[in-house]
């Protein structure tokens, strides 16, 4: 009976973690460039250990929480400094000594003409340099699909960088739709396509998340009821005592 009790407990804990993950996804459904997280489950014991150590009882756990980097929808804003990436890749930004990657292209110019994110990070060009606009050229900014920038019809010699990383699993969320790359190895994408006057929305599907929440909640309740049943059986066993 103990094995079944711990199996139900591990299942309940895993589903509780899954519910927290779904809640975090739903909370960011309106966050620009946000990428949802997905949970995969696994058995703690495998193969022969399922029989020898757990007597056939499956102990569940969270195997992995991974980020789904599929593209979100495109929202037209008409704002010149809103830029979306159509396809793969990331914008690269620098804040202090730290470098991050993002799909959120809601940019602005500071008083010195530096292109920045809403959180104050410098947006980098294809050569890893912070982009600084010559505001004396005017205010009519055009960003081509290649990322090349013109101001009042004059080529500014600037290009918004779009970078690819060797493995998206090396990207770690740090908040504000920013990611830190563990190990480095990024490179600029020559064939990236940027869309001025657009922003990428989150890739969260509300119906899909709500369906997952209902299924996970039911699994959690089933495990909780099993735990309650095992507890009642234990109480009855203690009342009856053991035959010896």
Image (tube, rainbow, N blue to C red):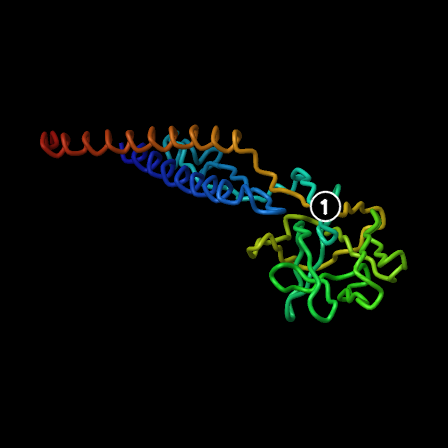
Q: x, y (%) of residue 135?
A: 79, 66
Q: Nearer the viewer, residue 243 or 200?
A: 200
Residue at screen point 84% across, 61% down? 158
Q: x, y (%) of residue 217?
A: 39, 32
Q: Nearer the viewer, residue 45 or 216?
A: 216
- From the viewer's perspective, is residue 218 above or below residue 147? above
Q: Nearer the viewer, residue 236 or 28?
A: 28
* Side of 210 relative to 71 (left or right): left
Residue at screen point 18% across, 31% down? 232
Q: How many marks?
A: 1
Residue at screen point 44% across, 36% down? 49
- From the viewer's perspective, is residue 57 above or below residue 103? above
Q: Secondary structure at mark 1?
A: loop
* Side of 140 relative to 14 (left or right): right
Q: Residues within 10 Å of mark 1 (few under 14, many from 20)?
A: few
Q: x, y (%) of residue 23?
A: 45, 41
Q: x, y (%) of residue 80?
A: 75, 52
Q: Nearer the viewer, residue 211 or 158?
A: 158
* Side of 229 relative to 55 (left or right): left
């Amino acid at each position: 009976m103990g094995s079944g009790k711990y199996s139900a407990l591990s299942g309940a804990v895993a589903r509780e973690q899954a519910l927290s993950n779904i809640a975090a996804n739903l909370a960011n459904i309106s966050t620009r460039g946000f990428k949802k997280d997905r949970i995969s489950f696994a058995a703690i014991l495998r193969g022969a250990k399922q029989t020898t150590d757990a007597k056939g009882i499956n102990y569940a756990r969270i195997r992995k929480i991974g980020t789904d980097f599929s593209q979100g929808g495109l929202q037209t804003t008409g704002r010149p400094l809103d830029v979306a990436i159509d396809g793969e890749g990331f914008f690269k930004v620098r804040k202090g000594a730290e470098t991050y990657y993002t799909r959120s292209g809601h940019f602005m110019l500071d008083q010195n003409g530096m292109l920045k994110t809403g959180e104050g990070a410098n947006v980098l060009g294809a050569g890893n340099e912070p982009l600084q606009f010559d505001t004396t050229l005017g205010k009519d900014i055009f960003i081509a699909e290649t990322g090349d920038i013109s101001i009042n019809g004059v080529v500014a010699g600037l290009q918004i960088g779009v970078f690819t990383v060797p493995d998206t699993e090396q990207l770690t969320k740090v908040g504000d739709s920013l990611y830190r790359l563990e190990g480095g190895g990024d490179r600029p994408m020559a064939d990236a396509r940027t869309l001025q006057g657009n922003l990428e929305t989150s890739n969260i599907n509300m119906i899909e998340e709500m369906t997952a929440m209902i299924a996970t909640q039911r699994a959690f309740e089933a495990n909780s009821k099993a735990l309650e049943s095992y507890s009642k059986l234990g109480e009855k066993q203690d009342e009856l005592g053991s035959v010896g």
